[in-house]
Image: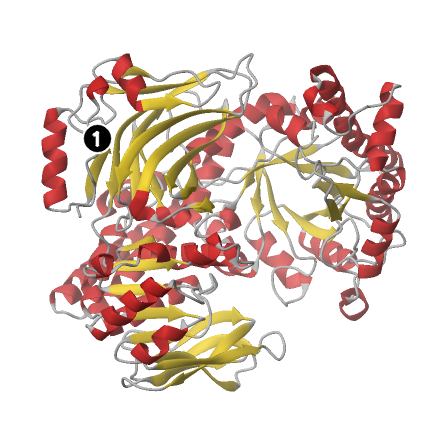
Amino acid sequence: MRWILPVLLAAAAGCMLAFGASPAHAAEAHSQAAEPEASAVIDPLVYADAAAARAAWKPMTGSAPVDVATVEGRRCLAMPCTFAGTDIDRASWDRAVQVDLSGRRGVRFRMFVRDAAPVGHFSIYFHSGDGWYTAAFAPEARDRWHTVTVDKRTTRVEGKPAGWSRVDTIRISAWRGQDRDTAFHLADLKAFGRPADVLVVRAESLIRAGSSEARGFAEYTEKTAAMCEAAGLRAAVVSDLDLAPERLAHTRLLVLPYNPRLPDPAAKAVADWLAGGGKLLACYTMPGPLEGPTGIADAGHVRQKEKGHFASIHFDPDTIGGAPAEVGQASWNVREASPEGHGARVVARWVSADGSDTGLPAVVASERCVFVTHVLLGDDRARKERMLLALAGHLVPALWEDAVRARLAAVGRMGPYDTFDAAVAGIRETAAGREKPRRSEALAALEKASERRDAAHNHLRKGKMAEALDAADDARRLLVRARCLAQPSLKGEQRNIWCHSAFGPTDRPWDEEIRALAENGFTAIIPNMLWGGAAYYESDVLPVAPEVAEQGDQVALCAAACRAHGVACHVWKVNWRMGWRAPKAFKERMRREKRVQVGFDGTVNGDWLCPSHPANRKLEIDSMVEVATTYDVAGIHFDYIRYPNRDHCFCPGCRKRFEEAIGRKVANWPADVREDKDLHATWLDFRRAQITAVVEEVHRQVKKARPQCQISAAVFRNWPVHRDQVGQDWKDWCARGLVDFVCPMDYTPSTARFESEVTSQRDWAAGVPYYPGIGLTTWPDRTDINRLIDQIRITREAKTGGFTVFHYGDMEMREVIPLCGLGLTKER
């Protein structure tokens, strides 16, 4: 079987292949199929005319047909998004194909877009069997051709797909973002990645079966595949439905990131493959049929005795070459694995936070398999990646050299730079504008980076792989440090950071955590101190979290530390959502009193309070006013000041209050508020009014009592869409002066999309300061200082006056904030 399979002839398109290839392209595709290369053409997206393109790409209902175009000298496919004056949710097109992506990392294509703002987000879908694989993507640039990469590890499963080997349709969708027309252009659609050395197996058979762990199977597959890639391993995600002997034949290492069971044919194929010399790395669960072939038995589940019981993995000396002696991992339970055969032995153990050995194995290794007794978590990322490479290299030594070469090639890839030399030149140019001490420090770091890079190449030539990797990683760290030292700060800007924990990012006192922010130039913290059903201070309005009795009033402690270090404290409330810390009795009372939300389908959502209920609105208002008037804080911050989605709330109380508002009965509730166009518009106004009433009354009471106390809100990024979807009319709040600043949650790793969103939000903020939310913690690498630099630069070019980072956690405090303080957020 070839990696990209030809399908039926498409005479209407005048093509040799149903992929849309011309005869010349067909020859190229044949050559690539005969000798698998790094990429293989699916569809070059070059058509003779519009008719040929439209024969291949079929629009979904309401979407305009595709067209052909020439943009910047490139022949391409034009995909129009007709959102103005229409009610379509998305512009979308399907392409029939027959393609085997099981051994590939994903797909790539070239994209050109002048104005992406009318598009909320882009999606690509791969149909297989009775379901789809789907992933979001975003343009990485505007007004120029650029490459978009969709890695299979980022895809979600919808329905019951039959595996990546059976993809029969590709769908491209652009979802409505604004009521404006736009278009985008695509070219050169390819599968990328040579048949992978390492296959990371997603438990799709269990996802298809509706397992309650479906989300975990997907999450840990993506994390493990991302760590493989970062470690330099050439890896691809594969479905457990695709684990046939022919797929395993050319695989060097199979990884089971979280696979309690395998389909029977897959289990047999893997067992036979292991017997024939295959190598396996499994995490957390060992499928029963593989215990004998691997020599490692899964002896059952062990819960932590207390928080910190499983805190780190400690390797026995001289067992796994190149592995770190210690790797941090805050696990909450593990498996008790035992060595049974094939030379299996325990090579690492779990150690508690107090340094005591738990006596439980963390890693067991045999000649055929390495078994890690929990899933791989994202903490201690650098050493976790090194551990993963060492375990892979222990099983397949040749993977070391491949990984070292990949890591060396990636040393200089950061921000706008693709190579080491380009990064050095760019950083030198940026550093030239800094004051002499910092410029000298940056140049010294560049020199050391070059020295360590040269050392890495020397070690590689001598076959010293671990030493080469250490030197390459040193070069990368030094280059990043040099770039951080070269960055300019901006006087007078507001530098906010959200903190999701009421107790701060670590177990240390608030004073230490606020001092770290102040020393690195951050001007404000937004700590999450109250929810719809819980308070982390001595509240007379909300139930008080039990930790307050033991650890103190967190608003008082945080505010005092902020005053001591000159950092503004804006207390963050999660509105309407009661939260996991809300007492069970409180939630039951809210349900009993019919104060919780009900979905369009009649399902009760017991975690969200209904915004139209007068008692709930009073609870929201009183709790926020209580904080603002009781404590000497800089401000109070709305979050979740919205409905959860368009399907809420349709409770009996909402019906009664809506009918009172319009002065008549709704005969068919709730269907009529969607099916009747005029009634639907009135319903959307009603929902917005419930949310805005709370913002308005909090503003009135707080400004009367403490005029200097600022009112702010974390808001959804796409106002035109979200004012209808979730009832959040933040443009209106800005226009009426109900908020002092807003923080649009622009959580995207795409700098082009971030720039487009920040530009659009300027008009919606209507002169009110807006400090775009940068989703650091939501990115694949939550320590990605290079991406943070690029997005902060965009806020400065847009003259927003500041930014807000999500969020202040332990990893961010240790690894990101100090790098910001080298120059980006603080002049030295």
Number of numbered labels in the structure image = 1
Q: Identify the secondary structure beneath mark 1.
A: loop
The location of residue 387, given as percent across then percent down, is 35, 69
806 left or right, relative to 397: right
- Please name the residue shown 75% across and 24% down the image: 683
Out of 119 and 818, give the one closest to the viewer: 119
Residue 488 seen from this side: yes
Look at the image and name its color scheme: secondary structure
Give how far across and how far down residue 786 sits, in percent. Answer: 40, 46
Q: Is residue 396 above or below residue 611?
A: below
Q: Within 10 angstroms of label 1, few (less than 14), some, or many (20 or more) residues?
A: few
Viewer-closest of 440 and 583: 583
Name the one closer to the observer, 107 or 112: 107
Picture quadrant of residue 474: bottom left
| Image x and y of residue 516, in percent | 58, 58
Determine which quarter of the picture holds residue 587: bottom right
Q: Horizontally, is 224 left or right of 532 in the view? A: left
Q: Which residue is mark 1?
A: 8
Q: Is 545 in front, or is 452?
A: 545
Q: What type is the residue that disc 1 sits on?
A: Leu
Q: Quadrant of residue 63?
A: top left
Residue 525 coordinates in the image, percent (x, y): 65, 49
Q: Is residue 219 visible?
A: no
Q: Is residue 345 above or below residue 802?
A: below
